[in-house]
Amino acid sequence: MRELSGVTKRHGARSVLRGVDLDVPTGAAVGILGANGSGKSTLLRILAGVSRPSGGTVTGRPRIGYVPDRFPARQRMSARAYLRHLGRISGLSTVEAATRADGWLDRFALAGGPDTPLRDLSKGNAQKVGIAQALLCDPELLVLDEPWSGLDPDARDVLTEVIGEVSAAGTAVVFTDHRPEAVRALATRSHRLSDGRLEPLEAEVETCRIVLRDGESVDWAAQPGVQAVRPGHLDVTLVVTVEARESLLLKAIQQGCAVLSVAAR
């Protein structure tokens, strides 16, 4: 899908990235942890193709949806008109662009409604539009820079659901966050960026993702080996240790659950 090999980035005499290697396969959810100023945004701009590395290689040409760390919302266009315009630029018909725009704005519950001018939106609501534009054209790679920043609790939950849904459908997702628990809970691959170098999170446990539907009610969070539970609209996604995968699948089948997918790390 997308691969960075030996990527470096310099701003003048300062090295921001130092020999970064990152493989992003189909359907992976890659979380990158790092403090402010660690180079996370620089790394994601290179991954999204909006910035070139100073050295190293970037391979793969997926269709990319990108949410930058600061969404440029100071525009007169309404949220709906902005998304329709981007959809048409991306090759959607006017009707399809409008349908998808309204669908995403409704799901994220944009305050003020879709006809609100972008310049009148709060930071959190502008972020919702930014996320919607990245999802508009069904990206093969979704690149999200601190995507939960500014969102209200309900919208945070919706975004978590959406990331689970699109990755289960085969879209690769790369996101940054400063919270270790959030990265570990959502990602199938977790990394830390520090001093320009990307390394696996310490004491990382190999995990996989199981998507279930229907069946008897089970307190999955209490089951051994379950690291995270992400309820969806019609299904539930479990992030589990590989060691516990078989026993959890057996329990799911015994409880009458349909196993929709099992995604290896």
Image: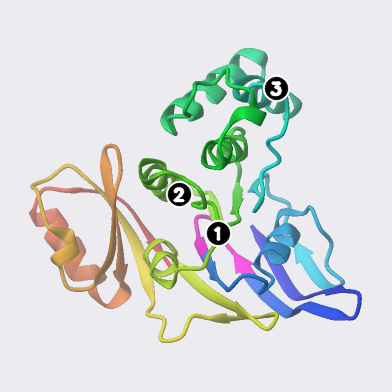
Image quarter hosting the C terminus: bottom left
Q: Which residue is mark 3?
A: 77
- Mark 3 nearby-residue class (10 Å; few <14, some 14–19, many ≥20): some
Looking at the rendered image, the disc whose residue lies closer to the viewer, 1 or 3, is 3
Q: What whole-number distance in Å separates the C-alpha atoms at marks 1 and 3?
A: 28 Å
SS label for mark 2: helix
Magenta highlight range? 23-30
Q: Which residue is mark 1?
A: 175
Mark 1–mark 2 CB contact (< 8 Å): yes
Q: Nearer the viewer, residue 215 or 156?
A: 156
Q: Residue at x 57, y 61 (%)?
A: 25
Kind of residue indicated by mark 1: Phe
Q: What whole-number distance in Å separates the C-alpha atoms at marks 1 and 2?
A: 10 Å
Kind of residue indicated by mark 2: Ile
* Image-based side of 218 in relation to 159, left or right: left
The numbered disc on residue 212 is: none
Q: Quadrant of residue 208?
A: bottom left
Q: Nearer the viewer, residue 59 or 235?
A: 235
The numbered disc on residue 163 is: 2
Q: Residue at x 44, y 34 (%)?
A: 108
Q: Residue at x 35, y 61 (%)?
A: 209
In the rendering, at what x and y percent does residue 128 appear?
Answer: 53, 38
Q: Quadrant of residue 262?
A: bottom left
- Ranked by sequence position, the earlier of labels 2 and 3 is 3
- Mark 1 nearby-residue class (10 Å; few <14, some 14–19, many ≥20): many
